[in-house]
Structures are given as C-alpha cells and as structure tokens.
C-alpha cells in the first residue's frame, strides 16, 4: 500500500469546505442541513481514514533506509550500502572494524574505495564491481595484514538521480591462507616424492587412477587422470595377472608388494616395485585403492647379473650346470609329488676338441653357441636347456608317455646341427651323441638321473645314431671305464706305459725295414693292458695327449739309440690319435722330438687312420703337408676298413698304405679279398705309394702278397710286438737270416 499524503488530504478538505460554504451562501434555506451533512461526512471520512491508517501501520512490512542500516549494522558479514553517486554510504560494523574506521566514518566513501581495493574513484572499476557476482578485493586491514574479500553487489533501488546498491562481502582471507598452506604442503609432498622417486597411483572406484606428478614423469603420462584399464595396458603382459590381483585386493590391513614391468617414459619396460594397500571409506571419506611405485630396474639388473653369473653359461648364454641342478631338483620333486615324468638328455658334440684345436677357440665358441641355440629351440614349457661343461649339454623335456620323444628330438637336433656351416668348419661333419634317462624312474635323485644319462652318453658312440637310452645294466661297465680313466692317469705319472715294437719286413729281401711302436700299459703286478682297451678311454678323456707325446719322444729316442748301437737304420712308425693329429702345433712337436733325439726325419713315420684323415680333409691335407715338409713319412693305417676310397690316394700326401689285417686274414681263401688287395696295390704303385700288409700270420699269405706286388709285411709271422731289448735280438737274428 502506498503511504498516506497529508498535504493532498488538506487540499481536498479545504477545497471541499470552500465549495460547501459557497453553496450555503447562495442557497441559505439549505445551509444548515448542508453543513450538518458536510461536517458529518468529514467526521465519517476521518474515522474511516483513521481506521485505514491504523490498519496500514499495523500491516507495514517494507523497511526504510534507517531500518536497513540498523539490520546490516550487526550482520556477521562485511556489508556496504552505497549510492553510485556516493550521496549515501553505509559501512556495517564488521567491515568498519576491519578497515579500522569509526561509526562516524561509516558514510565516508574513502572507506568504500579501500574496501573495494581501489585507490581512487574509477567508474570502470565500479562497473566491474556492480556487474561481477564475485569481485575479489585485497586491502590492508586495521592490523596491517592483507584481507581478501569477495563482493557480491545487488541493485536495491534506482531513480533518476542515482542507484542504490548493497554489496555483501565474503571474507576469503582464511580460505586463501588454507589454500596456500595446502598448495605448499602439496608442493612439499610432490617434491619429496620426486626426490625419493616414488610415484603414487590412487583410485576410489578401482576404475580410475589419480597419478602423482612423479608417476606422470616416470611413465610419461599425458595427465594425472588415467583409467585403471589404460594403466594396465602399460603393464607388461606377463605381469598383468599380478597387477589385476593388486587392483582387486580386498586386504585392508596389510601393505602388499609386487614387482612388475611397466612401459615407461622412454618407451621401454622398466621394473617397478608396487607397494599397495586398500583403505576402506568412512562416512566422510571415499575408499582408496592404490599405492606407490618405485623404479627398481637397477636393482633388478643387479639381481639379474648376479643370477646370470651364478646360473647362466657365459659362452652360450643358456643355463649352466648350477641352474640345471637347481631346476632339475625341483622337477624331480614335482615328478615325485604329482606323478609326472621328465626326460633328461645329455649331449656331447662329436670331436669338438678337433674343432677347437684346428679352427681356434672363436670358431669353437661359435659352434657351442649355435649348438645351444638349437637345443633351446627344443625346450618345451617347464623344461630347460643347459651347458654342463665343455661340449656337454643337457635338455630336460616333459614326458607325455611318448617313449620315442628323446630319440626323435635328438635326431632333429643332429639334423639341424649337421646343417650348420661355419666358415672354416665347412668340411667338418658336425654331429652330436646323446644319452638319456627318465625322471624319476631312473634314479633316486636328480643327480642320479643326470649321471645315468651321462652313462648312456658315454656308450652312445657305439649305439645306432649315436643315441643311447640308460639301462641299469650299463652302470657297471661305465663305472669300470671311469675307474680305468683314473688309474690310467696315475699309470702315466708312474711311468707304467711302455712301447713295444713290431717289425716290418721287406717281402722281397726278408730284411727288417722298420718297426711299429705299439703302446702297452704294464701294471706293477706285470699284467699287460692292451691299447685296444685303454687308448679309446684315453682318447675320450684327453689323456691321449700325454700318451702321444710319450710315444713320439720315446720312439725317436729308441730309434736313434739303435742307430747309435750300430743296428741297421730302420723306420720308426708311431700311431697318432685324431686329437693329436689336429693339434695346430703338431709340426712343432714332431720337430722338437726329432731335434731332441737327433733322429733324422726320414726314419720317422706317422700312421694315420682313414677316418681320422677324412673328418676334415682340407685340414688333414695341410697337416700332412707340414709333416712331409719336415721330411717325415706318412702311412695310412687300416686301409679298407673305413669309407675307403682310392680317390683319396690322390689327395692325401701319404708315402705308405697299410692294408688292413681283415683283408689278409683270409686272403688265401677269399678271392674277393685277394682281388681288392691286388687292385689297391696296383693303384698305389701307380701313385708311387708303397704298400704294407698287416697281420701276416703265415707264409701262404706272405707269398700271395709278394706275388700281388706288396712291398712290405708286418705280422706274427715275423714277430709280435716286443720290448726294445727283444727287438735287438730280432735285429741280430734277422741280420743272420738275411745275409
Ligand atoms: P694298429 O695301429 O693297426 O696296430 C696293429 C695292431 O695289430 C697291433 O695291435 C698289433 O699287435 C696287431 N697285430 C699285428 N700283427 C698281427 C697279427 O699277425 N695278427 C693279429 N691278430 N694282430 C696283429 P695292438 O698293439 O693291440 O694295437 C691295437 C691298436 O691300438 C693299434 O692298431 C692302434 O690303433 C692302437 N695303438 C697302439 N699303440 C698306439 C699308440 O701308441 N698310439 C695310438 N694312438 N694308438 C695306438
Ligand atoms: Mg698302426
Ligand atoms: Mg693297423
């Protein structure tokens, strides 16, 4: 309701009274009645207006300026009521206290400027204050510290002269302080994490992570928001299972830890230790899942290095014997517990020492690496390939009831290995032998089973395909050869080895032209061990080197001694094993033996077998040529037993061909043997190669061979291998008989 206007009421009453009085003057007969009616009406109207005024006063709700200032004065927030021409200004008590002004100053516009943080009247600044919902001002308060207030200004009245505004403040000072503290706490936290290189990932829903700045840096993330799914894609596929377990962990009491590879900022997988814990939410907080990641790649690399040193073979980079034994023991236990079975195959590269000696260690290592690589290809889940030592390897394979598996696997390995061509090794036929046994049936422990596979390997050279399965019966004979190896080593040191000499006779004159030095092992009790028994063992255990050195030196020494003693000059033939022949310093050794004894090279002959020469024909030829350069004679022993090919007579620089005893034994009855022998003699002659028949036991054989054109003979007919002193008697006897 609009307010009552007393001036308007007075004018209306004055005008109406003047009209009534004028009427009474001109119409006097009705004057009294008119006045009575008029006065009654005025009284009635006054009563009505009085009642209305009373009601109005009772019902009035709108406030005047005084009332407003009265209300805002004690409000618990900063407030200014101001007209934009500053004809009216009111600052409430709370703001006055803050500004440090008294009540009498509350209408000073300077206080308004200060409260709004502006220095001087500035219409654009005022426009900003009016139009902004949250105008932030900063000023120095009464106590000298900075106060920040956010102002919200509303228009309360507008007229032609000016507009009246109410600005309500919201003191942000404490909030700002808190924010600053929080920010610096956050900075402190981030810096600490950065210094400690610890990244954090936290989630409240197991769907999305908040990643700390260090995590962002370490993993090269685009932002700190990343879904768990996205994060999972950074985790190495093999580690995702354990990551999933960590994400879904319901353990709210313990901190757990895993190690996993995560693709990092540089694009490579690095190892991280992830320590995580689930924290249940309360009424006021959300649950938290996640934890801290710490880059442990370096530690891991150290561990790997330690593991490598302890468990990885340096040359082939596959497992070494330590690892084989560790893993093997575990597998053996698993076999026992779960009734599984596994094969263990041990493999040995044939004639590896020849490869090493002739082609050098670099090529030797190359062969080992390639062999390991081939083995590795045959490893199936749960199995292992390892290098035990030297050229000895092992393969563990799970058995699924197929007894042919080891045989098939080894054949495939042999096939692949055979195809391997290594520069200088092109002419060497690469092969391997294998022995195998089964876990847990073939032994009481893993080491037992491994040893049995090695037993089988030792006998594999005589087995078909050079593959041999372990059988308990082979145990005894192997033990025998191992023991023999040990006692042979002792025998060499104790000088129990001695050379016997078997004469070689000129079939036309009957004169002794040479002797073959044949080794004997004479035990202290007088028993003589045949070279057929111990030479193969010596060859497989590298004792052969020592034996050959002895034979070479002793043969030269003895021959020179006989010459000095006045016996006729004869040729001393010595036998070389393949490993001797492929020594790169063979020529030097022979030269030294000749030099040490003083024997002229023409009185020394080296006997080589066909298989020995043919295992690497190019190298054999070069070795033979070196010996020939020294002036030493070369004989091909046991001709006809191996892959005999007369074409080799053309290639190999030999001076003598020894026809194998197997042709001679039955030559008097066996026409084919005779035909072969006479053909070989003919061809040899055409090549200017002399011939000798070994194993002549009777005069019929002797005559046949003489007729066939054979130059020399060796056999029991003339004399068995005998000690030096017995040969001296033979010399004398022979001299008398052939005079
Ligand atoms: P080999 O080089 O073929 O030697 C000839 C073998 O035939 C000798 O056996 C000899 O005793 C035997 N023999 C000779 N004439 C007759 C005969 O008329 N009838 C019969 N039944 N046998 C005869 P031994 O001495 O037992 O040597 C066997 C093999 O051992 C040799 O065969 C040779 O391969 C090897 N050997 C012997 N001494 C050495 C050595 O010092 N070094 C090397 N690496 N091997 C050797
Ligand atoms: Mg011989
Ligand atoms: Mg022979």
Image: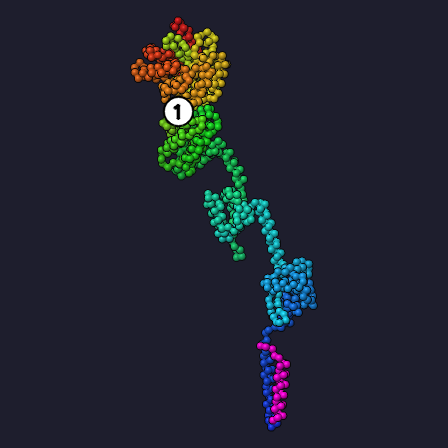
Quadrant location, the N terminus: bottom right
Image height check: is 212 above or below 366? Answer: below
- Residue drawn 47% across and 19% down? 586
Q: Is residue 305 left or right of residue 660?
A: right
Q: Nearer the viewer, residue 401 or 739?
A: 739
Residue 298: quadrant of the picture: top right
Percent across and percent down for residue 468 are 38, 28
State the image quarter where residue 524 is shown: top left
Q: Residues within 10 Å of mark 1 (few under 14, many from 20)?
A: few
Residue at the image position 59 percent from the left and 86 percent from the top: 44
Q: Is residue 680 magenta?
A: no
Q: Is residue 421 above or below residue 289?
A: above
The answer, for residue 14, to whether it is visible in the render is yes
Residue drawn 40% across the image and 13% down it: 502
Magenta stretch?
1-27
Q: Nearer the viewer, residue 431 or 489?
A: 431
Check if residue 8 falls in the magenta segment: yes
Q: Position of residue 671 (x, y in %)?
A: 30, 16
Q: Which residue bears the numbered disc 1?
A: 477
SS at badge 1 = helix
Can residue 410 be seen from the camera position used here? no
């Amino acid at each position: 309701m609009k307010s009552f206007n007393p001036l308007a009421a007075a004018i209306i009453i004055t005008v109406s009274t003047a009209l009534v009085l004028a009427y009474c003057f001109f119409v006097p007969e009705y004057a009294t009645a008119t006045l009575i009616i008029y006065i009654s009406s005025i009284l009635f109207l006054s009563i009505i207006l009085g009642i209305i005024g009373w009601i109005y006063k009772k019902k009035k709700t709108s406030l005047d300026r005084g009332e407003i200032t009265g209300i805002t004065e004690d409000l618990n927030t900063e407030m200014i009521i101001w007209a934009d021409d500053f004809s009216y200004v009111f600052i409430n008590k709370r703001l006055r206290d803050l500004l440090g002004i008294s009540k009498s100053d509350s209408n000073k516009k300077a206080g308004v400027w200060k409260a709004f943080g502006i220095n001087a009247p500035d219409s654009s600044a005022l426009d900003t204050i009016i139009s902004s919902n949250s105008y932030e001002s900063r000023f120095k308060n009464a106590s000298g510290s900075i106060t920040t207030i956010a102002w919200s200004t509303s228009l309360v009245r507008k007229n032609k002269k000016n507009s009246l505004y109410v600005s309500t403040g919201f003191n942000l000072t404490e909030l700002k302080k808190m924010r600053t503290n929080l920010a610096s706490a956050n900075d402190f936290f981030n810096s600490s994490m950065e210094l400690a290189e610890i990244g954090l990932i936290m989630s409240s829903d197991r769907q999305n992570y908040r990643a700390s700045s260090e995590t962002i840096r370490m993993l090269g993330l685009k932002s700190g928001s990343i879904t768990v799914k996205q994060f999972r894609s950074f985790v190495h596929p093999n580690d995702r299972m354990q990551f999933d377990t960590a994400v879904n962990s319901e353990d709210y009491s313990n901190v757990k830890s895993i190690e996993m590879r995560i693709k990092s900022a540089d694009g490579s997988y690095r190892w991280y230790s992830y320590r995580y814990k689930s924290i249940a939410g309360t009424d006021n907080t959300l649950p938290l899942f996640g934890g801290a990641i710490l880059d442990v790649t370096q530690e891991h690399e150290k561990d790997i290095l330690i593991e490598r040193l302890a468990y990885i073979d340096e040359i082939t980079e596959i497992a070494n014997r330590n690892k084989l034994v560790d893993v093997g023991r575990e597998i053996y236990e698993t076999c026992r517990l779960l009734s599984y079975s596994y094969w263990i195959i041990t493999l040995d590269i044939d004639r590896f020492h020849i490869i090493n000696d002739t082609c050098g260690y670099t090529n030797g290592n190359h062969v080992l690496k390639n062999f390991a690589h081939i083995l590795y290809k045959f490893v199936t889940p749960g199995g292992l390939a390892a290098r035990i030592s030297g050229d000895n390897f092992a393969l563990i394979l799970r058995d699924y009831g197929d007894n042919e598996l080891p045989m098939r696997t080894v054949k495939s390995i042999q096939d692949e290995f055979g195809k391997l061509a290594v520069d200088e090794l092109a002419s060497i036929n690469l092969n391997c032998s294998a022995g195998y046994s089964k876990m847990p049936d073939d032994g009481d422990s893993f080491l037992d089973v491994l040893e049995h596979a090695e037993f089988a390997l030792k006998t594999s050279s005589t087995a078909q395909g050079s593959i041999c399965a372990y059988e308990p019966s082979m145990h005894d004979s192997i033990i025998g050869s191992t023991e023999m190896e040990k006692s042979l080593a002792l025998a060499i040191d104790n000088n129990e080895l001695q050379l016997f000499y078997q004469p070689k006779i000129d079939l036309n004159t009957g004169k002794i032209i040479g002797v073959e030095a044949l080794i004997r092992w004479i035990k202290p009790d007088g028993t003589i061990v045949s070279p057929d028994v111990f030479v193969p063992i010596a060859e497989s255990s590298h004792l052969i080197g020592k034996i050959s050195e002895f034979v070479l030196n002793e043969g030269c020494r003895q021959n020179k001694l006989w010459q000095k003693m006045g016996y006729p000059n004869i040729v001393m033939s010595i036998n070389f094993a393949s490993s001797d022949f492929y020594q790169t310093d063979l020529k030097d050794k022979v030269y030294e033996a000749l030099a040490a004894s003083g024997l002229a090279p023409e009185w020394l002959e080296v006997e080589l077998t066909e298989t020995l020469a043919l295992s690497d024909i190019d190298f054999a030829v070069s070795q033979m040529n070196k010996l020939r350069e020294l002036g030493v004679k070369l004989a091909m022993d046991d001709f006809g037993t191996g892959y005999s090919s007369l074409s080799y007579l053309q290639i190999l620089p030999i001076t003598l061909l020894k026809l194998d005893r197997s042709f001679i034994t039955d030559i008097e009855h066996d026409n084919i043997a005779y035909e072969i022998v006479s053909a070989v003699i003919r061809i040899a002659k055409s090549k200017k190669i002399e011939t000798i028949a070994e194993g002549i036991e009777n005069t019929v054989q002797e005559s046949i061979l003489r007729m066939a054109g054979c130059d020399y003979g060796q056999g029991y007919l003339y004399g068995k291998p005998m000690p030096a002193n017995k040969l001296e008697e033979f010399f004398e006897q022979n001299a008398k008989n052939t005079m």
